[in-house]
């Protein structure tokens, strides 16, 4: 599950993790047992950035392969209520960027999710 969190100026929130490949990602993560995808989105945003997300809507569902296994990913969109504060453990950097000036490298999954989000906004 990934979340396209926006500020009131329309900039999008991206994070860099302390683990895995170097790159910028949307906040997100796994869905726990007995948790809905929406509940997971609210929880992950709070855990990774210290922010809440409001007016959240489901943008799409992505069927993909993750580590060689089928995986269903949910993409949400919403407004972030504050400036992000990375947790310093899992997320080492969290910043808003204008959509016309995104940082590199963006992960391939982030690019695919961004494309789906932009198609919905058109």
Image (spheres, rainbow, N blue to C red):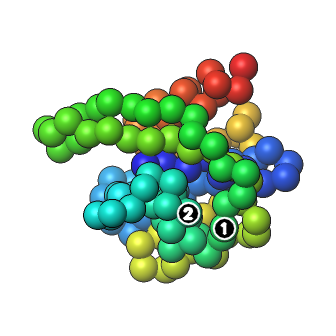
Marks 1 and 2, how far apart at CA: 7 Å
Image coordinates of residue 37 in percent, x first then y, are 44, 52
- Left or right of 71: which side holds 24? right
Q: Nearer the viewer, residue 55 or 84?
A: 55
Do the residues bearing badges 1 and 2 touch, measured as CB atoms within 8 Å? yes
Image coordinates of residue 62 in percent, x first then y, are 39, 31
Residue at image location 14% in from the left, 38% down from the top:
68
**Dot 2 corresponds to which residue?**
42
Residue at image location 54% in from the left, 27% down from the top:
116
- Left or right of 89: which side holds 11? right
- Disc 1 residue crowd, few under 14, some 14–19, many 20+, Cα 10 Å: some
Residue at image location 15% in from the left, 39% down from the top:
69
Q: Can you say whether 34 is above or below 46 in the image?
A: above
- Disc 2 residue crowd, few under 14, some 14–19, many 20+, Cα 10 Å: some
**Dot 1 corresponds to which residue?**
52
Residue reaching furthest to the left:
68
Q: Can you say whether 119 is above or below 60 in the image?
A: above
Residue 37 is labelled as none
Based on the displayed image, in which of its 4 quarters is residue 61 positioned?
top left
Any part of residue 17 in sight:
yes
Name which of mark 1 and mark 2 comes first in the sequence: 2
Q: Quadrant of the C terminus?
A: top right
């Amino acid at each position: 599950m990934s979340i396209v969190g926006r500020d009131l100026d329309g900039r999008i929130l991206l994070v860099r993790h302390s683990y895995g490949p170097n790159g910028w990602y949307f906040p997100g993560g796994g869905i726990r047992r007995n948790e809905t995808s929406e509940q997971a989105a609210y929880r992950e945003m709070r855990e990774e950035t210290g922010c809440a997300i409001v007016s959240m809507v489901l943008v799409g569902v992505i069927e993909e392969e993750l580590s060689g296994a089928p995986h269903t990913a949910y993409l949400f969109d919403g407004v972030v209520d504050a400036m992000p504060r990375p947790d310093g453990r899992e997320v080492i950097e969290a910043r808003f960027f204008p959509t016309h000036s995104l940082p590199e490298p963006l992960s391939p999954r982030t690019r695919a999710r961004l494309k789906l989000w932009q198609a919905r906004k058109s």
